[in-house]
Image: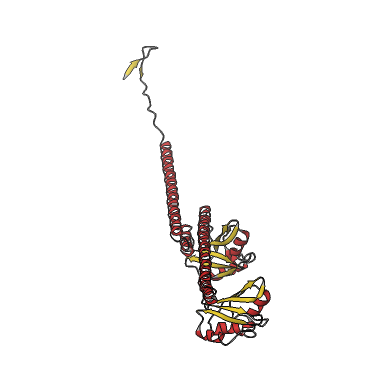
Amino acid sequence: MRRRSRAGSKITKSRRRKRSTPKRRNASKAVRNRAVSIADQQTEVSGLTRELQEGQEQQRATSEILGVIARSRTDVQSVLDTVCRSAAQLCQAYDASVWRTDGDQLLLAAHHGPITQIESVPLVRGSVLGRSVLDMRTVHILDLQTQGDEFPVTSEYAGRMGFRTGLYVPLLREGVAIGVIALRRAEAQLFTERQVALLQTFADQAVIAIENARLLNELRESLQQQTATADVLRVISTSAGELQPVFQAILDNAVRICDAKFAVLYRYDGSAFHADALLNVPEAFAEELRRGPRHPTPESAIGRLVKAKATIHISDVRAESAYLEGDPLRRATADLGGARTFVAVPMLKNDDRRDRCLSPGSAPV
């Protein structure tokens, strides 16, 4: 098409306008940005989904543990077993264990997982378990097999049993450590902050279970003692001055409350002990007691009781040298009565040692 120019009569060609189009590289960049944005969103969704699943699993575990606590208020073992299983699974550990303090030892209370476990460890700072209890703090170590200088006890166990990473949280009750819960891994891989916090929650739940059982057991024992006292007082009020029914009531309640195998009530006349009442005593030992009074020697258990006017408690009557010599009554209690643990309680009147002695013997161990 031709047209005339306004400036003159010459015919000029009309110019065509060029249509602007986006460059290809700008389009590619937009596509890439859109893909990155979608990937970020998918990653965020995956993370939130994982957190939601972990939260739901934690809630289910907590509900399960609380349910066990509610159903078994005095059965601490069921609670601790559930705590160990949940802790190992949710924290992705190879095993979990709960330990209780017992004097200078830590005793295994519960365990879940394939790693071999021992029954007790010394309560010392050279053990990570002991350090967590003594310092009352969480201890988290990447590779226990390399900690021989600071934790020689645990490092030796780690090398022998094949574990590396350990996480230890103390069980605290009113500012006192009563035990520790531990997680272990066979590989050197630290636990996440979320897993550490979760284990602290499990530790709190274990303490709740232990404390509930302790309080209920104390209440039950108190009620048993009150019932036993009322029973003895009832017998006294109805016995019309007869001693044998009273003695038998005392022995019956002592054996039941102390979970003993048998009991003997001795009367002390100032120089010898006479067996005035027996309950569930094996016949061979009962026949020996009927032979006559027992004269205490200074090294014998009843001799020490006379001198100290205090309770004598022997965890293993066969363990001390006095069992072999100088204490025929204790030998007879073990050999003829079949007892291993022995407790003797003086019955004092006006601080007078010449009275009676109640001596329940426990079942063999």
Query: Do we see residue 311 in this rendering?
Result: no
Q: Which one is nearer the viewer's eye here, 360 or 83?
A: 360
Q: Residue 212 location in percent, x, y?
A: 51, 59
Residue 296 higher or lower than 197, as above or below: below
Q: Along the horizontal axis of the image, is 217 left or right of 10? A: right
What count of labels does the image hold? 0
Q: Residue 313 location in percent, x, y?
A: 61, 74
Q: Which one is nearer the viewer's eye here, 90 or 283?
A: 283
Q: Which one is nearer the viewer's eye here, 347 or 71?
A: 347
Residue ID at (54%, 79%): 277
Quarter of the image for the N terminus: give it. Answer: top left
Residue 6 higher or lower than 335, as above or below: above
Q: Residue 316 location in percent, x, y?
A: 58, 78
Query: Do we see residue 67 in this rendering?
Result: yes
Residue ID at (43%, 42%): 37
Q: Coloured how?
A: secondary structure
Extreme residue in the left direction: 1
Q: Residue 297 location in percent, x, y?
A: 66, 83
Extreme residue in the bottom direction: 291
Q: Along the horizontal axis of the image, is 250 left or right of 353? A: left
Extreme residue in the front direction: 240
